[in-house]
Amino acid sequence: MRRRLSTLLLVLLGCCLTGAGNKPEVVPQDITYCQLARDPSAFSGKRMRIRAIYLYFFEGSRLKSPTCCSDHDPQMQIWVDFDEELEGSSKRLLHKFPEGMGEVLVVFVGKIETGKVYGPFGERVRLVVDRIEKFEKKAKPDACQDSSWVPQNCEPSGMLYCAGRASELSSRLPENPLNQSNRVSLILILATKWMTCAPLC
């Protein structure tokens, strides 16, 4: 009898210790893309839920607004990374994304970070996704036309936008005469992308 009682107490103690070790999940706060883009520092360090377009391509991983925003810097870019411990249902949704590059309309949950440069294009805001709650639409970007569900003319486009990107990227090359050809090549590449309406610009 005593042995059974001791065993029961050990099991109950183990359950209590296991429960105490689990961190309670932080309830995410709902936010729109426009709210985040308007004042990202106000949400830094917080776990948020956001519905947005996720655009990804070679060396690109960022959010776009599902609606046009009129009250923030249009060149505000939000980098996206995925938590290494993404749970099973989120991984299954992630596998539905177009391979290589694409645009998807999703609901992400994750932590907002600011204060550093997170992406290759100078993104100073990052969303670290720990859950994909909803997957609504997907598209493989066309060379010259966005999908019908992507808002039109919300972001800078054309040569001015590409020239800005070229200037931003080329300015990061070390000051060395040998890099002048690299700067010229970069500008030519981005100009070509603009001329063909590629999604990079």
Image (spheres, rainbow, N blue to C red):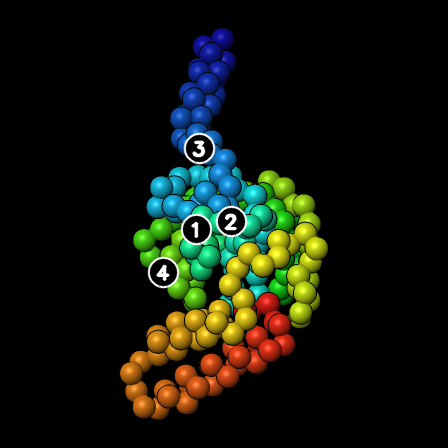
Identified by mark 1, the residue type is His
Relative depth, front residue between 176 and 84 = 176
Residue at the spot of label 3: 26
Mark 4 or mark 1, earlier in chain: 1
In whole angstroms, how far apart are the C-alphas of marks 1 and 2? 7 Å
Give x and y (percent) for residue 151.
62, 53
In whole angstroms, how far apart are the C-alphas of marks 4 and 1? 19 Å
Relative depth, front residue between 24 and 138 = 138
Identified by mark 2, the residue type is Cys
SS label for mark 3:
loop
- Disc sitting over residue 185 in the figure: none
Residue 2, by quadrant, is top left
In whole angstroms, how far apart are the C-alphas of marks 3 and 4? 26 Å
Mark 4 closeness class: few <14, some 14–19, many ≥20 residues within 10 Å: few
Give x and y (percent) for residue 72.
43, 51
Residue at the spot of label 4: 117
Give x and y (percent) for residue 125.
40, 53
Mark 1 closeness class: few <14, some 14–19, many ≥20 residues within 10 Å: few
Mark 2 closeness class: few <14, some 14–19, many ≥20 residues within 10 Å: some
Task: Answer yes or no: is residue 152 visible.
Answer: yes
Give the quadrant of the C terminus: bottom right
Give x and y (percent) for residue 62.
51, 57
Identified by mark 4, the residue type is Val
Of badges 3 and 1, the one in the foreground is 1
Residue at the spot of label 1: 72
Compared to residue 42, the image places residue 159 above or below, namely: below
Compared to residue 34, the image places residue 14 above or below, namely: above
Q: On the picture, is 144 further left or further right than 190?
A: right
In whole angstroms, how far apart are the C-alphas of marks 3 and 1? 28 Å
Compared to residue 136, the image places residue 80 above or below, namely: below
Mark 3 or mark 1, earlier in chain: 3
- Disc sitting over residue 69 in the figure: 2
